[in-house]
Image (cartoon, grey):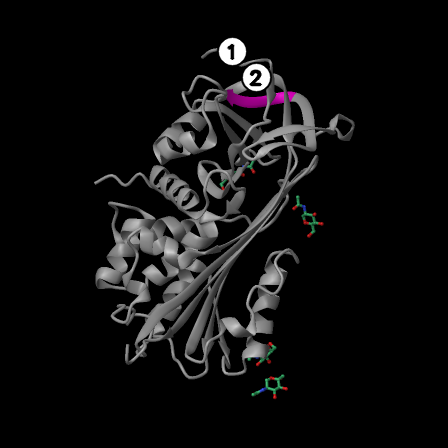
Amino acid sequence: MVCFTKVLSASLAIFLLRLSMPPSEPFVFSPLSLNTLLAIVHDGANGVTQSELTNLLLNGCTPSDVTEFYSSFTLSLPSTNATGVTLSSANRFYVDDSMKLRYDYKTHIQRYFAAQILRTNLRNKSEAARNMSKFVEEATHGKIRNLIKDADISDDALGILINAVYFLGKWKFPFDHSGTHERTFKGANGGRKISFMSEYASFRVNQKTDLGTVLIVPYQDSNYSFFYLMPSESSDLGTMMSHLTGKTLIYALRAATDFVIRITVPKIKLESQLDVKPLLSNLGVRRIFENDAELSKISRVPLTISKIKHSALIEMDEEGTEAVASTYMKVQMKVISASIKPNPVILIDRPFLFGVLRNEDIIFIGQFT
Ligand SMILES: *[C@@H]1O[C@H](CO)[C@@H](O)[C@H](O)[C@H]1NC(C)=O
Ligand SMILES: *[C@@H]1O[C@H](CO)[C@@H](O)[C@H](O)[C@H]1NC(C)=O
Ligand SMILES: *[C@@H]1O[C@H](CO)[C@@H](O)[C@H](O)[C@H]1NC(C)=O
Ligand SMILES: *[C@@H]1O[C@H](CO)[C@@H](O)[C@H](O)[C@H]1NC(C)=O
């Protein structure tokens, strides 16, 4: 069977966004951060626990497709920022002194996910929380602080698995500061004045899709871009999102072609937190949270996952975009008891879907409302 990883992972990003937040509320998250962490657990799972994760991460594909897809993403990240884009994804597994990881699992996650494994004393909650938060703070260049608090480390915690993603991209055509002005954004909850940036240059546009207007703004490294998808005036974000699939999104992006036009887009600054556990339960991933979780490839100690939290932030200005995300997962002992020519001017002033792409892979996705 052919496994269409790009379409499947784009669909997952859309599902997660749709389930996380109603279309009237602004939101951002990094599918790359969350899914990498889930893939690391997937590779330590078997039975129903693993198949639920395989179906979530790449529905219809095999467990080794999941490993290959998410591993290649992590391992292919550039180590330099010579091209005007920095993208890094760091994985760490803090393992309590009382637990040993199985040798095969340890070498697997080091090799396929470049994971660092650190021993820690999780009983010293304040120091462990401080150490882990410091790692996230450094990996996100100071943007996410105090991610893990003492109270997040319960008495039965045996390990904390963390991913941190950092993206900094400079626009290929920086916006001229003199073109930045306040104007009205016709938000989901009424109009409000915000800053808009404007630029006349070459952008990829698709206005031939029923979805609305696709606008793709390139970064200096042509492998990366920022996309806007604004529903047509007769529709709205909620209606569009309820019909959107990975396939329609990818095809709409692919159909965009170059035009020299003036674009006017809002400056964005967004920060979101997400409790992932209820979301995954809604998407059919339940066993990892239960007492019969099959995670014996990770350790001899019977394990279950008790918490998954995600934080993300995106900031866009005239020069470029900076976006960060971090996800952590608490591993604990089981509870023993229990082509038309586009309009020459594109103005993005109504609620829209956006994302940061590496080629066709969605690194960040969100909605601005
Ligand atoms: C590239 O790295 C240098 C040194 O770490 C940093 O000063 C600069 O802002 C980075 N540029 C980009 C586009 O990431
Ligand atoms: C915190 O990090 C320091 C320095 O790396 C280390 O010596 C210490 O053991 C760590 N503490 C815990 C609780 O992991
Ligand atoms: C936790 O670590 C701190 C800093 O190293 C130390 O002062 C404190 O005694 C430790 N607490 C426990 C309960 O081990
Ligand atoms: C795009 O990515 C490929 C593969 O990672 C790399 O070889 C190429 O240099 C990148 N393109 C640019 C413009 O940096």
Residue 65 seen: no
Quadrant of the rendered image holding ligand 2: bottom right
Residue 281 spot, x, y in % from top left? 32, 56
Task: Judge by depth and name the residue closer to the eye, 39 or 331.
Answer: 331
Check whether the beta carbons of the residues at disc 2 and disc 1 lie within 8 A of each other: yes
Is 80 contained in the magenta span? no
What residue is shown at x 47% (from left), y 36% (from top)? Answer: 359
Which comes sooner in the sequence, label 2 or label 1?
A: 2
Above or below residue 312? Residue 356 is above
Above or below residue 207? Residue 268 is below
Q: Secondary structure at mark 1?
A: loop
Q: Secondary structure at mark 2?
A: strand
The quadrant in which the N terminus is found is top left
Which of the 4 image quarters holds residue 171? top right
Region rendered in magenta: 201-205
Q: Which residue is mark 1?
A: 341
Above or below residue 270? Residue 328 is below
Please tell me the numbered disc located at residue 259: 2
Principal secondary structure, stretch drawn in magenta: strand
What residue is shown at x 61% (from left), y 67% (from top)? Answer: 134
